Image (cartoon, rainbow, N blue to C red):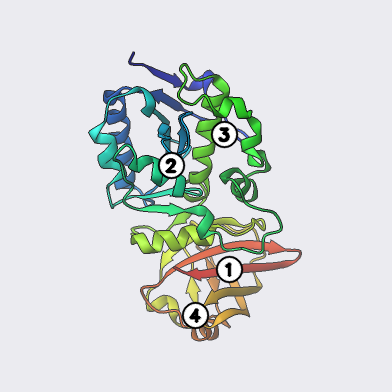
Amino acid sequence: MMFTDEYRGDNAVEAHGNTKLHVIHTNKKKQMAITMAQYERHLSLHHHNIVGIDLEYDNDPEATQKPALCQLSIGKNHPVLLFQMSDTERCTVFGNFLADPRYTFAGFSINGDKTRLERVKLEVANFVDIQKEWRVPEATMPLDSLGDVSGMLIDDYYNNMKKKITDDEHQRWATLPLSRRLIEYGAKDTYAAMAPIADTCVYAEGLELTNTEWRSMLGCLMIPNRGFHAPFLHRLTTADLQESWKLPSTIKFHASSSGKLTLETEHKNGYGDMQADYHIDSEDCINITTGWKDFVSQTAFEAGDVAMVFFYKEEDSINFTIFAL
């Protein structure tokens, strides 16, 4: 039987803080096509082209197990789609979306997902494994789920997400109707792959990134949250690499009107840091001045590099961590 269930408004799925997720659970190909068209329209007009993806499996033996549910998200301002693959016919629109090389699909520990998609003759063209892109292998705890990563990057709410439903419930993804607890788990697990990318980054106007740069950006996001403000992405120009760098007024950072800051980065020569002066001008723009040119020379930044800048405070100091994607 074909169905579409929506969870929105007072019935929306509550995530961390005041975040509420509009969720669509369906097995209808028409509804899938409508949602895919909305996703594609949004991705064509905005900076990021990353789609959060997760799969839940049926209860068959592992050797023959197939996807029961595919969850997709492009951020909190758009519906999270839960597509019930175990109870529908093959959907060409869905298959074409997964295979579209324009999009980067971010999942966690994706080898099992790839295998099960192959069993239903589907393939994700540009699949990024957040677990493999994690930049801090010396983390003190095993990162065995997307919830663990999101707990560090977004909110403690996501810690130990897999423990929020039982083992018995994990075996019911192909059993309809799905419980409210499974709907909530599926939506939040997938949104967690998107939140640091779609909902916390500030992009320079007109910025376009290659798939390689998107992958590198994802890796840069996978650092412990030290209280950073929304990271800023900008393609460096020749003018940016001179004696000073003026950031756009869209970057808001609560600090004195002038002072010292620490610039740090990881680059081809290893880790580097340096002190520099800054001031906030009459246009409310942060200008990095004395020390910037030396930092550029040390790091070998070049015009055309995409800089991803994290801003954070440590006690009384201001730190800018800059990665070249």
* C-alpha separation, residue under disc 1 versus residue under disc 4: 15 Å
Using the image, determine if residue 177 lies above or below residue 138: above
Task: From the image, state whether disc 2 or disc 4 is nearer to you.
Answer: 2
Residue located at (44% from left, 68% from top): 325
Residue 230 in sight here: yes
Q: CA distance from mark 1 to mark 3?
A: 28 Å
Image disc number at residue 19: 3
Q: Position of residue 103 (x, y in %)?
A: 33, 50
Q: Is residue 249 visible?
A: no
Where does residue 310 sit, x and y in percent of width and height? 57, 62
Q: Do the residues bearing badges 1 and 2 touch, measured as CB atoms within 8 Å?
A: no
Q: In which quarter of the view is residue 85 placed?
A: top left
> Which residue is identified by label 2?
53
Label 2: element kind: strand
Disc assigned to residue 268? 4
Sequence-first disc among 1 and 3? 3
* Mark 3 or 4, closer to the camera: 4
Q: Are marks 1 and 3 in contact (CB under 8 Å)?
A: no
Please name the amino acid that badge 1 sits on: Thr
Marks 2 and 4, how far apart in space? 32 Å
Can you say whether 210 is above or below 300 in the image? above
Residue 166 percent location from the top left of the image: 64, 28
Q: Residues within 10 Å of mark 1 (few under 14, many from 20)?
A: some
Residue labelled with disc 1: 321
As displayed, is residue 240 above or below residue 107?
below
Q: Earlier in the sequence, mark 1 or mark 4?
A: 4
Label 4: element kind: loop
